[in-house]
Image (spheres, grey):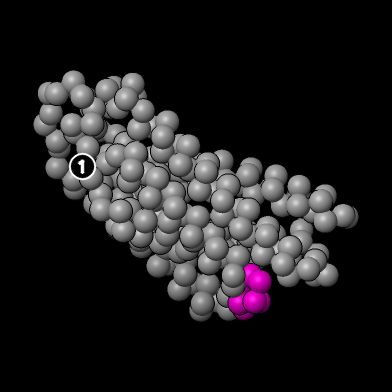
Amino acid sequence: MSHFSQFLAVAVIHFLALISPGPDFAMISRSSLVYSRRSGIYSALGLALGILVHVTYSLVGIGLIISQSILLFSIIKYFGAGYLIYIGIKSLRARRVHQTAKDPEAVDRHLPALAALRVGFLTNVLNPKVTLFFLGLFTQVIRPDTPLWLQVLYGLWMSLVTFLWFAFVASVLSHSIIRRRFVAVQHIVERVCGGLLIALGVRVAVDQSR
């Protein structure tokens, strides 16, 4: 397999995994709908930075150690599950915002940039499924003789695509047309997102696959 063919394989596999529903998508939806486009984009940046963490430990071999250690993998799994459940509970307990203004921006509850970035980063880094995904990618798809600089390039590409995709999702969900429709049911959507995050957290916690 040529380096170009390998890159295409990595790019396609990563994008298919990226667009699949999961914790990252649920978190971006919540940040964009409940807070604002700005919050959603900062959360997308956090996801992209999380990708770089996974790439880094995969390159230096730590990913393999994590996958082989029941203790380390369990720690990541339960921390990740706990964090998703924590965010979900926060959504369920959020107070309803009463707003009659026609301007959808008037109902934005701004999340500080650093907080939005942190939510995205932790959601991605603490997801054990992402750990296994990158372990499989760097051991089964990317050949061992692939130059290190090229593997780093693959990682940077996946981080960039992750940011662009979820920034796009955030922009779509925070569009004025969608926001106007969202205002009337904001409390319902936030609770749905909260329930989904809790369900995903429980699923991560009880999943026995490795």
From the viewer's perspective, tell me whether residue 60 is left or right of residue 44: right
Residue 56 vertical placement versus 199 (above, below): below
**x then y, percent, for residue 153:** 67, 60
Instruction: Name the residue: 73% across, 63% down.
Output: 150
**x then y, percent, for residue 41:** 40, 45
Q: Compare residues 151 and 132 and report the one nearer the observer.
A: 151
The magenta span reads: 58-65
What's under tag 1, amino acid-wise? Answer: Arg
**Quadrant of residue 32 in the image?**
top left
Q: Is residue 200 visible?
A: no
Magenta-drawn stretch contains 62? yes
**x then y, percent, for residue 169:** 46, 37
Which is the main secondary structure of the residues drawn in magenta? Answer: helix
Q: Compare residues 37 and 136 and report the one nearer the observer.
A: 37
From the viewer's perspective, tell me whether residue 202 is left or right of residue 113: right
Residue 73 vertical placement versus 133 (above, below): below
**x then y, percent, for residue 181:** 29, 22
Residue on which the image places disc 1: 109
Instruction: Name the residue: 71% across, 64% down.
Output: 151
**Quadrant of residue 144 in the image?**
bottom right
Q: Compare residues 182 and 69 and report the one nearer the observer.
A: 182
